[in-house]
Image (cartoon, rainbow, N blue to C red):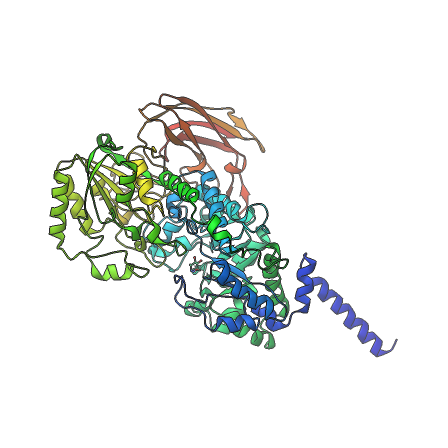
Amino acid sequence: MTLHKQCLIVFLFYTFIQLCAQERSSIPEVQELLDKMTLDEKIGQLNLLTPGGGVATGAVVSKDVENKIKSGQVGGLFGVSGPDKVRIAQKIAVKDTRLKIPLLIGSDVIHGYKTTFPIPLGLSCSWDMELIEKTARLAAIEATADGINWNFSPMVDIARDPRWGRIAEGAGEDPYLGSAIARAMVQGYQGTDLSHPNTMLSCVKHFALYGASQAGRDYHTVDMGKIKMFNQYLPPYKAAVDAGVASVMTSFNDVDGIPATGNRWLLTDLLRNRWGFNGFVVSDYTSLNEMMFHGLGNLQDVSALSLKAGLDMDMVGEGFLTTLKKSIAEGKVTEEEINRACTRILEAKYTLGLFDDPYHYLDSSRPKKDILTPKNRQFAREVAARSFVLLKNHKAILPLRKNAKIALVGPLADSRNNMLGTWAPTGNPDLAVTVIEGFKKVAPTATIAYAKGANITDDKALAKKVNVFGPRVVIDKRSPEAMIKEAVDVANSADVVVAVVGEATEMSGESASRTDISIPKSQKKLIRALVATGKPVALVLMSGRPLSIPEEYNMPVAILQVWHPGVEAGNAIGDVVFGNYNPSGKLSATWPRNVGQIPIYHSVKNTGRPNPEGKYEKFKTNYLDVPNTPLLPFGYGLSYTTFAYSNLRLDKTEISGNQSVNATVTVENTGDYDGEEVVQLYLSDVVRSITPPKRQLKGFKKVMLKKGERKEVTLTVSSDDLKFYNGNLEFIAEPGEFVIYVGTDSNAELSSSFILK
Ligand code: NOJ
């Protein structure tokens, strides 16, 4: 054989090996397309832009978008909606580019599209997975009717620090509840067939640990050990992946010293190799570029690092677009790495059916049929009522009689602009129902006199900061004293006072952290003055986070926590205040006594110096100034009726292998109203190889009980519920005693134990 022939054989052999090593798409159409693409075209697919024009969701907007689409430099857009507008962009992509590759059209549909539901933190307090899935389904129907095929939701970041403004956007503090909600939302958005024009890609975010930013300051450093990560913070992301989520968004923070967007351990070792995720990964808004500020090098460095780590798409920052070609030339990344990312994005487009028909989300007749229909709004009203949590009901002030003489006061009683809540860029605050309007509708025979009573805040500088998206805080021309006087006069001539108080919409959400999470001072003064009248006072409290309200809680008042309830706010509040719906919400995040207790959550560990009595003792774990317990525990929430729990029994006292345990309890409605109760099960793993939390939520069921009715409720603890990630990060159960607690909140008292052999 000649040398020439030998060389040829070696060359062919290596080419063959290389081809085998290359990840080929399992979808032949995608592979065929990829094979035709130039390097520039592939890099273009990794670029996600926002042309601006809508509500800004980040600090910069993209430039020259139309030309970039034309020249094949864009894989997807967000912040564009409506079939006609989207069609313009999609047409450029499929008519004017060489390979006619359609665009992904993304959006932040966080709690409803145009039919705005309560903020996610509120929604999570319904503990009703069917309801939550339906909200996601309806959001997908509305959003896809408007041409959107990719949703940046759910946000599943566990948050145990209510200073963090984005606690509003998630499901609170608990990994078990958070995982159930993650599954429900992914299923709701994606349905069973992603190529159907009313389903959309879901994007779980922000991977990972974004909710654990230090001191509750947004975008701040995260520092967490793997055991806490795996057991407490990662489960909801994993639940979304297990439910088949199509995409993952990286977070702004670092994870163990490396920003999530460029973290290979996170994006490849964990997400792909350990969890088996096979969708695509997108950065958060310019989070790739921000790695420069994190101190990881210049734009070319961080772009190469991120691509290699497993990032597929770059949101807004154009680091991939502007540097990857150079990095290939310099041998810093390989074309194979670009192929891999591009394949994942093309596969998502294929799954959506965009290659068959790039316009199949663009039916101009749909918005009218599908968006903000009376039926959708009615559903939003029901959902909102189910998210409210009755925190206190002194002398059964609530519900009110429908013919009562009511003083309706407070800066949020007649404020349309604050009803939707944070992160509702697709909603329209003008369509929201105010509390006054809702009261008049639900109780037309009531006599209602209104007074504003106070500004949301008197602090002009704060008002300016929270008015970024519109006038949320309007500072009255009158003096605070004059406003309080008017409210007190109105209160004095009424039977009962309802004060609608709390936070403006943008006092929570992105970049809206607070170090003082009490009710603003202006409103505290109003509340004191109202209570001093001696009239019964019900506080309707709005906020995007757990607040610190020890003073108000100790007053002789009723407190109904309504979060930011969405487009049907006033009607839903009316329904609950006047007893059309008996509140059934339960807190999904602990309410502290004061900021000093933060981070505070229910699944704490015992420490070596526990203090179960709760009275201060020297050399025990406690504070000098407040008890360890929160003001209101996780899982807490009252009803207009009362429920009694008795007779907890387990079907087994010993199990092994994959066996499960059924815990049955008798629940009785012992009060005067029909009502729903969330029966909760907590589990304690008494002895194990790494320190266990005192108890952890491992089951819940929402049941309806008529007045006087009694039900047997059974909750099952599966063998997986006994497992945890041990010191080697293996997911295992260890033999020994487990105690089950069942009851109305995380302080559930009825208990029974079993042994795992
Ligand atoms: C930044 C936010 O962190 C993220 O949640 C959102 O999806 C993007 N902006 C896009 O708007």
**Quadrant into which the N terminus falls:** bottom right
* 349 or 547: nearer the viewer: 349
Q: Position of residue 362 (x, y in %)?
A: 54, 57
Residue 234 visible in this rendered orientation of the protein: no
Q: Position of residue 234 (x, y in %)?
A: 48, 49
Residue 736 visible in this rendered orientation of the protein: yes
Ligand 1 image position (quadrant)? bottom left
- Tell me the quarter of the picture where residue 751 sits: top left
Taking the image as shown, residue 397 lies to the left or right of residue 746, namely left
Q: Is residue 538 above or below residue 715?
A: below
Residue at (23, 62) in percent of width and height: 461
Question: How many numbered discs sit on the rendered protein?
Answer: 0
Taking the image as shown, residue 232 lies to the left or right of residue 274, namely left
**Quadrant into which the C terminus falls:** top right
Taking the image as shown, residue 161 lies to the left or right of residue 726, namely left
In the displayed image of the protein, which residue is found farthest to the right? 1
Q: Is residue 442 above or below residue 278?
A: above
- Tell me the quarter of the picture where residue 681 sits: top left
Q: Position of residue 526 (x, y in %)?
A: 16, 46
* 401 or 441: nearer the viewer: 441
Taking the image as shown, residue 183 lies to the left or right of residue 173, namely right
Q: Position of residue 282 (x, y in %)?
A: 51, 60
